[in-house]
Amino acid sequence: MSRLIKKPIMLSKDVKVEYQNNNLSVAGKLGKLSMVVNRKTDLKIESDKIFVIGKGADTTSRDYRCFTGLTWALVRNLVIGVTEGFTKKLEIRGIGFNAQVNGPKLVMKLGFTNPVEVAIPEGIKVALDQKGVFMDISGIDKHLVGEFSAQVRHVKPPEPYKGTGIRYVNEYVIKKVGKAAAGATGAPGAAGGGAAGASKGGKK
């Protein structure tokens, strides 16, 4: 049995839940979301709690654990989405690189010949700082927020040498060593080898 389903999903007073024929609908102060519950699981709804119940006799099987755990996580995301929402923070790095919201589109200057325009999906909000380099992508649907954030980052992922491009805030980017730096690193050894060769030659 998944350890998650042992814990109930708590509901605040302003959340309304409807569940019928495996269709779950959750409404809160930020909006309304719905999902189809997997038929290998069921939900038990109390006044301020939702319990996920697995169907099947073998509670130790892998399928039982996977489906119950997945359903629990998806239902919890719905509840969090309509009450708190989800946000992904991105950062644009590079001289002259920035972005702005132009109506239903996100317009980004990233060093290409022309600015790149990306349509903002319905239900997604994009907020930028004054310089247009820090970006907050938010919405009530966790999957949609993550998918659009990945789409924006994919336009120009962090460049491996200087790190310019679009990255998540606090994302660690592994940088490669440039040819000049690699040559400089190998130079002392080469010089040492030359000196050693010269000293050997002097002994002859």
Image (tube, rainbow, N blue to C red):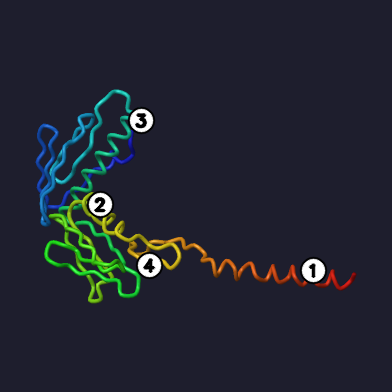
Q: Are marks 1 and 3 in contact (CB under 8 Å)?
A: no
Residue 149 in which image quadrant: bottom left
Q: Residues within 10 Å of mark 3 (few under 14, many from 20)?
A: few
- In the image, residue 126 sits, relative to residue 39, either above or below, namely below
Q: Residue 6: x, y in percent?
A: 29, 39
Ranked by sequence position, the earlier of labels 1 and 4 is 4
Dot 4 or dot 2: first in sequence order is 2
Determine the CA span between mark 1 and mark 3.
66 Å
How far apart, in angstroms, are the residues tagged by discs 4 and 3?
Answer: 43 Å
Q: Nearer the viewer, mark 4 or mark 2?
A: 4
Q: Residue, x 30% and y 71% (percent of image)?
A: 97
Task: Please name the residue that numbered disc 3 is placed on.
Answer: 62
Residue 196 lies, in percent from the top left, at 79, 69
Disc number placed over residue 164 in the picture, else none: 4
Viewer-side residue, 43 vs 193: 193
| Neighbour tally class for label 4: few under 14, some 14-19, many 20 plus, Cα within 10 Å | some
Q: Which mark is residue 133?
A: none
Image spot of residue 74 (x, y percent): 23, 43
Which labelled disc corresponds to residue 147? 2
- Residue 197 — which label? 1
Question: In terms of secondary structure, where does tag 4 sit?
Answer: loop
Q: Residue furthest top?
A: 57
Please state which amino acid type lies under the numbered disc 1. Answer: Gly
Q: Nearer the viewer, residue 8 or 163?
A: 163
**Would residue 194 appear left or right of 111 to someone viewing this image?**
right
Please state which of the two labelled residues, at mark 1 or mark 4, is closer to the viewer. 1
Disc tally is 4
Q: Secondary structure at mark 1?
A: helix
Camera-nearest label, 1 or 2: 1
Helix, strand or loop at mark 3: helix
Q: Residues within 10 Å of mark 2 (few under 14, many from 20)?
A: few
